[in-house]
Image (cartoon, coloured by chain):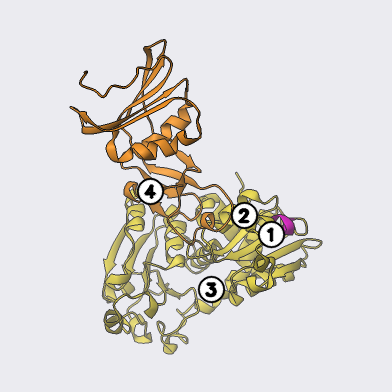
Chain colours: A orange, B yellow
Amino acid sequence: MGKELQVAALENGTAIDHIPSGAVFKVVSLLQLQKLNNRITIGNNLKSSKMGSKGIIKVADKFFREDELNRIALVAPNVNLNIIRNFEVVEKKKVVLPDEIVEIVKCNNPKCITNNEPMKTRFHVTDKEKVELQCHYCEIKIKKEEVVLL
Amino acid sequence: MRIKSLVNIVDYDRDDIYRIIKSASKFKQNPDRDLLQGKVCATLFFEPSTRTRLSFETAVNRLRGRIIGFSDSATSSSTKGESLKDTIMMVSNYADLIIMRHHLEGSARYASEISPIPIINAGDGSNQHPTQTMLDLFTIHETQGRLENLTITIVGDLKYGRAVHSLIQGLSHFNPSFNFVAPEELGIPDKYKTFCDNKKITYKEFTEFDPEAISRADILYMTRVQKERFTDLMEYEKVKNVYILRNRMLEDSKENLKVLHPLPRVKEIDQDVDENPKAYYFEQAKNGMYTRQAIICDLMEIEDDMSM
């Protein structure tokens, strides 16, 4: 047995490593993995020398767009992304929080138009380090711990 | 670049503000023109507001424009569950401009994104009310001869005061100096202190209605302290009479000082101030009509033909 959980190596696909254990299922939700038919492996609460406890997600034969992957920065800014082809890691990436986030985050203001009208939410990232967002419509600011995903 | 809709005072830059002020002063000299002849303006007041609505409607009427709309969402198609988007799209078939007040924050911003015609935000929930700020800026300019380098004392509910927040943003282009006078529960939010710090705008905070805040001011902007904003009613009882302006408090004020208030005023300005020539709040309200005429014509790209 290796020091990691026995997870089949990917031939081709995307591996997301070093996800904080509390964020794993939020990442699943952000990437809409429940809608995919691809082979997916999700591991959580795995031992990590770096983090103590971590999660990993491997999606076979799926390569996400950069903007899709960057959504992960909302809940897990320090993940490692590995793009795999022919069992080799061809690219290593980090996620970067974009300047704007559309559709994924709910506005916490019940009096915001976005909670009362069929429309997409839109947030500006006002602080990338602290993950602070501002609603484009009602202008309230949301801190990282207040972020509610749609 | 000229904006299509006015949603927030920050949509206007410095040049825009001066342009509107110049135009408003021409309208003040002659508000009865036919610049909007043949135009239809829709006033969609999903949330009632008689004062603002009448000001806008008079502004349009005096320029020979026609008005359609509603003054209360109870009489509109929203009661049938029609979305805001559908209402805006429907009205844009009939009108050349929409002036809207809505109880939901962000509604005007959304309307401006989907509407093929210009939108003027006449108030979206507790968020923005840019035409109030524009008329405040016009009034300040009118009474002080300038907007630059003024000392503005703002009193009352600085935490929830929509007009206050917007005024701070509107004045930020002009190197102001602020005195913020408020009870602790209603003090200026950190968001706006940070805003001032980032723009290198100086300010001083007072919890007492300090004579220094009056004696050094060019403008004294009074706002109402509302009982319902207090979580601790005993605190309200303690402070309810502290932030009241009485005539004798203006004895040591500067000659150019003017007292402003976004109205309606309740107790915060004593009736004995009304006779003081420094009391300017009713003229300020009247300026609302001229300022709105200027904003309407500006958005509709109607040049006024009056030469000065």
Q: Residue at x 75, y 59 (%)?
A: B95
- Residue assigned mark 4: A147
- Please state if A56 lies on the left or on the right of B113 as rendered: left
* Secondary structure state at the residue bearing disc 4: loop
Instruction: Say if the magenta span includes residue B89.
Output: yes
- Residue assigned mark 3: B284
* Secondary structure state at the residue bearing disc 3: helix
Q: Which residues are magenta?
A: B87-92
Question: Reading the chain from its start, which is encountered first: label 2 or label 3?
Answer: 2
- Residue assigned mark 2: B111
Q: Nearer the viewer, residue A69 or B48?
A: A69
Q: Nearer the viewer, residue B134 or A110?
A: A110
**Mark 4: amino acid:** Val
- What is the spatial separation of the Cα atoms under label 3 and label 1, in whole angstroms? 33 Å
Magenta stretch, main secondary structure class: helix
Label 1 is found on which chain of the structure?
B
Mark 3 or mark 1: which is in front? 1
Mark 2 or mark 3: which is in front? 2
Mark 2 or mark 4: which is in front? 4
Residue B87: assigned label = 1
* Secondary structure state at the residue bearing disc 1: helix
Residue B257 image offset from top left, x and y in percent? 41, 73
Residue B242 image offset from top left, x and y in percent? 30, 81
Q: Quadrant of the N terminus of chain B?
A: top right
**Mark 2: amino acid:** Ala
Question: Reading the chain from its start, which is encountered first: label 1 or label 2?
Answer: 1
Residue A92 image offset from top left, x and y in percent? 35, 19
**Mark 3: amino acid:** Gln
Label 2 is found on which chain of the structure?
B
Q: Residue at x 33, y 34 (%)?
A: A77
Rendered position, B145 above or below B51: above
